[in-house]
Amino acid sequence: MTDFDPLWVPVLTHYDATPDRRLDRERTAAHLSHIAPHVRQYLIAGTTGDGWEMSDQILTDWLGLAQTPGILTKDQMVLFGAFGDTTEAVIERARLIERAIDAKPLAATYAGLTLCAPVSKTATQDEIAEHFRRILAATTSPIAIYQLPQVVHCEIAPETFTALAGSDRITLFKDTSGEDRVANSGVSAGSAKLLRGAEGDYAAQMKPNGAYDGWLLSTANGLAPHLRSIADKVAGGDRKGATAESDALSRLVASLFAAADGLPSGNPFSNANRAVDHILAYGTGWKNTPARIASGETLPEEFLAAIETLLTEAEIDTKAGYYSS
């Protein structure tokens, strides 16, 4: 990849009010426009964006939006998650994405597919490697490998990753485990960039302070200006300033995620970020519009009110609202 930028976001999926819960194009376009000044690289159908639960229809809606001139531009980059419970299911989804892009190019720059290890508690490293090799053989896109043991129940070992990274199609490695074993192992990443997906301790994890080239963070859906500021300070050598901002953001994010813990439905990390974006989008009128999640349920009002309080205490403007439906 050229013109590397350290900040990526697994963008939220916004749902309309129809019975089959299609992608809300207008709301999604507004969200992308709101964060675009600070983050220009998007993972669509990632875990935060409900990629594991996403129907082919919603994915097709997303592809259509990404193909629409004016919503995204070639200055922005897009990855698509291709997730599934089996290798065959992943290949089927990957081919759906590639066929759609072959038929009609994206308005943004296509950065490739994001793939996880196989969903298996007992997968050996040989089986994990074979899973990726089969997908590489069946597809043509650049590949971002996603370390996500919380969902797939197995972990890519450093030696397995470095063997896979010998392919020039492996461009990114994202680790959300929080263990950072691959990045801290010292194995060769080939030409791939290492992105941290675990939240917190932002400044210390990015080169030259840490082992990562950048971040792919769910919190960039609502807190992109803060992450951009930290990244800029790290790049500019302002370690003290970056650390101070990083510590403050880490405390806020921990509180936001704690507030989402225990909700009866949905991914807590997605729920927390959806709540932040909902408050920022609708401002003082946030109670007038439900915050829909993938299941069709809505986030509880008391939870959204708690998120509003945390943002206000962090001196983030919760009143203006960037979107009016």
Image (spheres, rainbow, N blue to C red):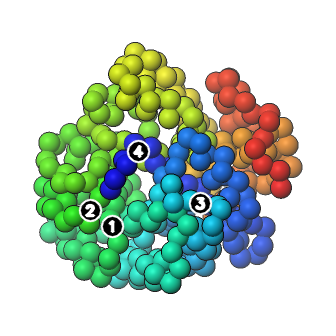
**Which residue is the site of mark 3?**
72
Up the image or down, 102 lies above or below 10; here it is: below
The amino acid at mark 1 is Pro
**The residue tagged with tag 3: helix, strand or loop?**
loop
The amino acid at mark 4 is Asp
Q: Residue at x 30, y 40 (%)?
A: 212
Q: Is residue 2 left or right of residue 186?
A: right
User: What distance separates the C-alpha of mark 2 from that of mark 4?
Assistant: 17 Å
Query: Which numbered disc flags the more N-terminal residue, 1 or 2?
Result: 1
Asked whether disc 1 touches disc 2, contact meaning CB atoms under 8 Å apart, the reply is: yes
**The residue tagged with tag 2: helix, strand or loop?**
strand
Q: Nearer the viewer, residue 54 or 191?
A: 191
Q: Position of residue 305 (x, y in %)?
A: 75, 37
Label 2 environment density (alpha carbons within 10 Å; few <14, some 14–19, many ≥20): many
Q: Is residue 268 visible from the viewing direction of this image? A: no
Quarter assignment of residue 122: bottom left
Label 3 environment density (alpha carbons within 10 Å; few <14, some 14–19, many ≥20): many
Query: Which numbered disc flags the more N-terminal residue, 4 or 3?
Result: 4
Q: Residue at x 70, y 71 (%)?
A: 21
**Circle 3 or circle 1, nearest the eye:** 3
**Which residue is the site of mark 2?**
170
Q: Residue at x 55, y 55 (%)?
A: 11
Q: Residue at x 29, y 27 (%)?
A: 209
Q: Is residue 62 left or right of residue 94?
A: right
Query: Which numbered disc flags the more N-terminal residue, 2 or 3?
Result: 3
**Which residue is the site of mark 4?**
5
Up the image or down, 133 lies above or below 180; here it is: below
**Which residue is the site of mark 1?**
142
